Image: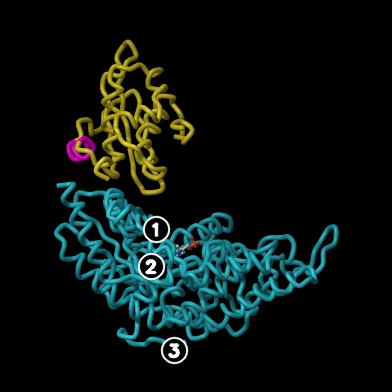
Amino acid sequence: MPMANNVNGFDVARIRADFPVLARQIRPGVPLVYLDSTATSQKPRAVIETMDEFYRKSNANIHRGIHTLAEEATAGYEGARRRVAQFINAPSARQVIFTRNTTESINLVAFTWGRANLNAGDIVILTEMEHHSNLVPWQMLAEERGLRLEFIPVREDGLLDMDAYRELLELEPCLVSFTHMSNVLGTINPAREMIALAHQAGALALVDGAQSVPHFPVDVQELDADFLAFSAHKMCGPSGIGVLYGRKELLEDMPPFLGGGDMIKRVYLRSFAPNEIPHKFEAGTPAIAEAVGLGAAIDYLESVGMQAIAQHEHEIVAYALERLEEIPGVRVFGPSAEHKGGVASFTLQGVHPHDISQILDSFGVAIRAGHHCAMPLHEKFGLPATARASFYLYNTREEIDRLVEAIYQVKEIFG
Amino acid sequence: MDDLYRELIIDRYKNPHHRGVLEPNDISFEDDNPLCGDHIRIDLRLDEAGRVSEASFDGHGCAISQASADLLVESVLGKTLDEVRLLSKEDILDMLGIELGPVRLKCALLSLKVLKAGAYGLGEASDDLVE
Ligand SMILES: Cc1ncc(COP(=O)(O)O)c(C=O)c1O
């Protein structure tokens, strides 16, 4: 399908019709306004039906059994791996490892590459805007190995302090692990530049792509990333499957992660020889239907066009910021629209974000309230919690208007 | 929603009757709701007969968590610790007079969890206390 590169060619109504849940009414007469895609995206019919059909027609375990269904299931699973590789421009599908989610992908790196390569006193650089999934695995490893963790500060305007980053690199870190896009501030970090700087300093770079891969084109070769982690459920795919991309030499040298079936070449009573990549890292029966669903999600996203999706979200978030900032008592966090993706985190004076979210729900508006798995970032800004509206290809300006109207209702109730 | 944000709840949230800390105190306990970062501390003073003579709460969080803490500490005045230990989820819901889904229930029960952990003299609060 041709890409809709300009806004006028981007047919939101047609896209919305592809997502059955968007027709849902939260109560009679109150249609759903889904503004929580950063937590998880909704699923288009193509994904739901592909998975349904897999279970109806081809379900079998993979890489074992020589019957028709086993062949079809294996082809579906491995086909999805190739589809992912194309999508992120990985040199080879063997560099695409299926995990459960972004969190497991990062844990995999921490506990295989990290354990094999990091020792007491070694430095890992993170940022102050990381999701807990890119903090806690490193804290666990730091505890075990005596590593030193350093953090690139977030400036008041929501951007990373690149001067501080350059200084930190003088400490000769082994790894820089950072989010491509903040799930709270929406900040899109200059990943290519950050990776180039890391490499110049002799460090590897891991990119948490949980919020970037679903929302704009990400090319691992252009970025020169050593590792990239992301989750299918945030990109129109199912929950239960995620991806770790890694540079081939690194993956080949890394010890296995979990032990069991499929990750071995040979097993003896007292030892084993690991399988080749990617299977070395995929112990046990994986999420087969989910992989097939992820493949369908990528087909869907590409049929719309990642560039077009990014452009659409950019316009929606710019409009949202403009409207939110008009409301007395609302404070919006993060950089201006030009530096951010489709996320608007805000507070409303005198009302806890939980209460905002609860009242918005009664108007059908689904947003998230809390610390969004980024407690240290909230602490930095002196906030226990924020309310967050987030956007995807299916959101419209009218939905932003509904959000804003509902916020005025919150103000009314809390007087 | 109109139910959830009954006047009583909004009123107690905006103008709590028992917010503050008691120093010194006989019992003091605090805990967080890790899901949303709500925080509650409850302090109690007991009289010679072992009954709660003064009670206060402090912390931050949503209207539900703060209003239920305010109503809860008010309700324990005059009670013995044994009576406090018997308080249950139903008591909180009766006081609030609303129905709550599983997520908001945690907000409403945080104060009870803190209170009971204090009354039992536990090192850590547990969800078992409010099941
Ligand atoms: C930036 C970022 N990293 C990591 C994650 C974790 O993703 P998952 O829960 O799918 O592992 C998220 C999810 O919210 C995220 O936004």
User: Residue A100 got which mark?
Assistant: none
Q: Residue at x 35, y 66 (%)?
A: A153
The span shown in magenta is: B8-15
Q: What residue type is disc 1 on?
A: Ala
User: Residue A374 got which mark?
Assistant: 1
Q: Which residue is mark 2?
A: A182
Colour yellow belongs to chain: B
Which element is circle 2 on? loop
Q: What residue type is disc 2 on?
A: Ser
Q: Chain of mark 2?
A: A
Which element is circle 3 on? loop
Location of residue B32 (image quadrant)? top left
Q: What residue type is disc 3 on?
A: Pro
Instruction: Say whether marks 1 and 3 touch (CB < 8 Å).
Output: no
Residue B112 is left or right of residue A293, and the answer is: left
Q: Residue at x 42, y 61 (%)?
A: A39
Q: x, y (%) of residue A203?
A: 52, 76
Q: Which residue is mark 3?
A: A2
What color does chain A have in the rendering?
A: cyan
Instruction: Say whether marks 1 and 2 touch (CB < 8 Å).
Output: yes
